[in-house]
Image (cartoon, helix red, strand yellow):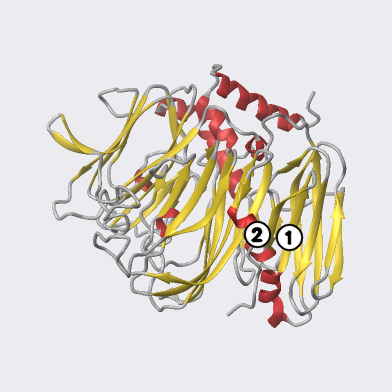
Amino acid sequence: MLKNQKTFVFISLFTMLLAGCAVDTSKFMLTDMIGNEWKVLKPKSMQEYQASSYDRRSVAFDQPGWFTNRDASQYIRTDEVSGRKENVMLDVDGPGAIVRFWLTTFRRNGVIRIYFDNKTEPEITIPAYDLMKLDLPLGRALLQPHSSYEPKEKGGSTLYLPMPYAKHCKVTFEDKDTDNQPRYYQINYLKLYKAETFTLKHFNELKDYAAKINDRLLHPDSVIISPTRNIDQQIAPNGQASVDLPKGSSSICMLSIRIKTDDPADYAQALRSTVLKIEFDGEQTVWCPIGDFSGSGVGGKPLKSWYRTVTDDGEIISRWVMPYQHTAKITVLNLNDKPVHVSLKAKNSPSNWMKQTMYFHADWKNQNNVPLRQVDVPVYPTDKNYPMDWDLNTIEGSGVFMGETFAVYNHMHVWYGEGDQKLWVDGAKFPVEYGTGTEDYYNTSWAPVVLYQTPFANAPRADNADSFGYNTFTRTRNLDAVPFSKSFRFSLETLGWKDGFADFAATTYWYGLKGAKSSATTHQSIPGKLP
């Protein structure tokens, strides 16, 4: 018998879905969005993919065109339907579910249609290339306008409402602009063992429940109630402080961390030089500067997201569930040349260790002076200005990718993030996700960006309108988490608006079965002095 009743409920539902039992898939998936406990279990019958408008000249990494950048208005095909032309964005067999739908454009004339189970009539019709026109009562956790959104013309939006289907799903766009408006899109979807198809009628029955889920995503727990295990002390330069957690099968369900320095001018450096290290069952799985672990990057800027919060007064709150079977130890390392005061509280919750339980990982990789290249034509790897796929992390083993924080110091006075994100799973020759640009991946559009906060993607820092200096993006996965059985790789094309350089610091959050290892851990970056 499980010790934690709440965990039992989520695990039971999760097991039922994987086994193909009859469940209300739409309600179940909404419930999963706020159920962090089940996310520590490795799914057996689920895969994540993305359809996008990436440049179709990108065929393989060793062929010309891999870094071409015309990522707009690329479709699978065009269908003739009742005398109209519908551009097909997604066409997949089920069972499955759409779990994230991102798009943007300039003018929005046209109609989006979503068809389920090979029906000739769409279940959902949106009267513009604008998800904000979806006629459903959705709050800002489930449907978000981008920071650049303008109601009449330019801008995009992101939809997180899960839409399952039993047999088939097709998404199309009938374009009513004749001047080749750029249409960018990303549709993340899951392949499941079994699912009941989304209908507007059923959603109307669930709308009050969906509103509660939306409110919960916007207002996660932010107060740690005792009992806790604590660190509260001054740590000398190159010193450390540790605390052992309760023995036996348990989980860290919340962490609270505060960093203080004698001189406020040292605070940003302290957040980068003070490292959080966590060992579960004798193995280190977390090694990350505290500022980067928080999702805020450099400087401790406020953050409001589902898994993490950074308050205006500097409290860092983590809601990542971190299970262990026998023992856990938290250590804080001060790798700076000045003392730092650390206050840390860890809240535990008893839980049963299961065969599919995974360990939580947070890895950090840093590289200064990463060369960026301006490329928009097919090129060969031998060309001197050939860019590269910069790996945020690579993992060997079995697990689930849960997101990252990307903290940048841009040396240029122009946009650095033109490159596409690529997620590779289990050694496949082509990515399961091939993006359309850095800001697009992080649920906004049109660079450079301004600050924004949403439950699953945030820009907590952007120093200058031209993107010079410090910039931080973070995105965490919910239903769009990426399972892998053998290996995982996350890379970013090093493309900017001109040739130049930037410093990259990437924190990756993931769960892994025992034995899973990452390149970021094997080749550990050590934090240095900030620019």
Residue 455 is at least partly visible in this image: no
- The earlier-in-sequence mark between 2 and 1 is 1
Residue 96 x, y percent position in the rendering: 44, 29
The image quadrant that residue 492 belongs to is bottom left
What residue is at 66 percent from the left and 30 percent from the top? 10
What residue is at 60 percent from the left and 64 percent from the top? 296
Query: Quick check: 181 above or below 253?
Result: below
Tag 2: amino acid: Phe
Q: Check whether the beta carbons of the residues at disc 2 and disc 1 lie within 8 A of each other.
A: yes
User: So how many labels did they put on this image?
Assistant: 2
Horizontal side, residue 396 vs residue 193: left or right: right
Residue 436 x, y percent position in the rendering: 35, 54
Q: Bin the neighbour count of mark 2 within 10 Å (Cα to Cα): few under 14, some 14-19, many 20 and up.
A: many
Q: Bin the neighbour count of mark 1 within 10 Å (Cα to Cα): few under 14, some 14-19, many 20 and up.
A: many
Horizontal side, residue 42 vs residue 439: left or right: right
Q: Secondary structure at mark 1?
A: strand
Query: Quick check: 272 above or below 349?
Result: below
Q: Secondary structure at mark 2?
A: helix
Residue 41 x, y percent position in the rendering: 65, 34
Q: Specify the quadrant that holds the N terminus.
A: top right
Residue 234 x, y percent position in the rendering: 85, 71
User: For the residues marked 2 and 1, what is the alpha-carbon distance in whole angstroms?
Assistant: 8 Å
The image quadrant that residue 396 belongs to is top right
Horizontal side, residue 432 vs residue 17: left or right: left
Residue that label 1 marks: 276
Residue that label 2 marks: 293
